[in-house]
Amino acid sequence: MTPDAEESRWVHREITRAETKGKEIPQDAARTVAFSKDGKTIATGDDLKKVRLWNVFTHGEVVLTGTPGRVTSVAFSPDGSTLLAADDEGFLMRWDTGSHRPIGEKIQVDTYLNAVAWSPDGTFFVTAGDHIRLWNGATMIKEIPRTVVTTAVAFTPKGVLVTGDDIGSVFFWDPRTGKTIYENSAEHDQPVLTVAVAPNNRTLSTANTYDTIHLRRLRDSS
């Protein structure tokens, strides 16, 4: 897979506030959430150092054990069999979503972790904090050098890595080479909190710390 630099051509729209209504699943101090691919399970992580799995239909709850710090990010593998969680002490945890048991030992990845994301094919995942690192299980396979803190990560459906950082920049990367495809150093004037790519590979959403969301259409996807 060789990402196409044409993915960097965007049409921009900004959202300053949006309100939605829906069912609530009770959760204390939740700071991160993720859906399983089949849409049946929600994972949440919170400031109480808990990772929980929720049944979307019954709201039944399972609390997973083994998180040393406040949970900053959770992510399901594409096949739904594994859940990742990162915390503010730099640890990475993995669980089998069928048995709810930990997979291996927790891994000390960094001094602080902000985000985790799986590659679309499930062959590796990315952790982000002071460093951007690619992992195959407990083995680090690549590090992408950065001089700033990476605060958010996501993949396009075709495998381009998108990152946001604490100075408001958004980068597109080829994760297999570690080379930059495109960068926008003026995407936000505040740290980027989160990035997400639509399943159709046509829209990128980024949000900063002051209630601003940017939507950008990806005209030519890789």
Image (cartoon, grey):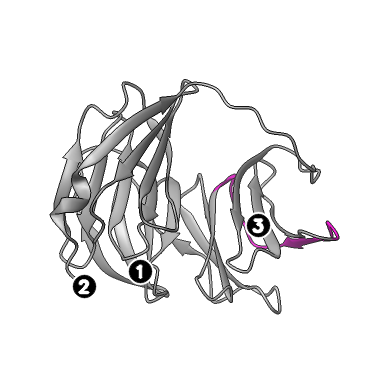
Q: Mark 1 or mark 3: which is in front?
A: 3
Residue placed under numbered mark 3 in the picture: 43
Q: Is residue 110 visible?
A: no
Residue 203 visible in the snapshot? yes
Q: At numbered mark 2, what does the secondary structure look like: helix, strand or loop? A: loop
| Mark earlier in primary sequence (1, 3) | 3
Q: Which residue is mark 1?
A: 135
Residue 32 image position (x, y, % from top left): 59, 45
The residue under the point 26% across, 48% down is 219
Q: Is residue 133 above or below residue 211?
A: below
Q: Is residue 65 magenta?
A: yes
Q: Looking at the picture, does residue 136 appear above or below residue 179?
A: below
Q: Badge 3: few (under 14), some or many (20 or more) residues near its Cα, within 10 Å?
A: many
The three-letter code of the residue at mark 1 reads Trp
Residue 54 percent location from the top left of the image:
75, 59
Instruction: Examine the residues drawn in magenta and state their main secondary structure.
Output: loop
Give the percent coordinates (x, y) of residue 88: 50, 44
SS label for mark 3: strand
Along the polypeptide, which appears first: circle 1 or circle 2? 2
Q: Which amino acid, mark 2? A: Met
Front residue of this view, candidates 38 and 173: 38
Magenta residues, start to end: 58-72
- The image's mark for residue 1 is 2
Is 14 located above or below residue 69 in the figure?
A: above
How far, Cα to Cα, is label 1 from label 3?
A: 21 Å
Q: Quadrant of the N terminus?
A: bottom left
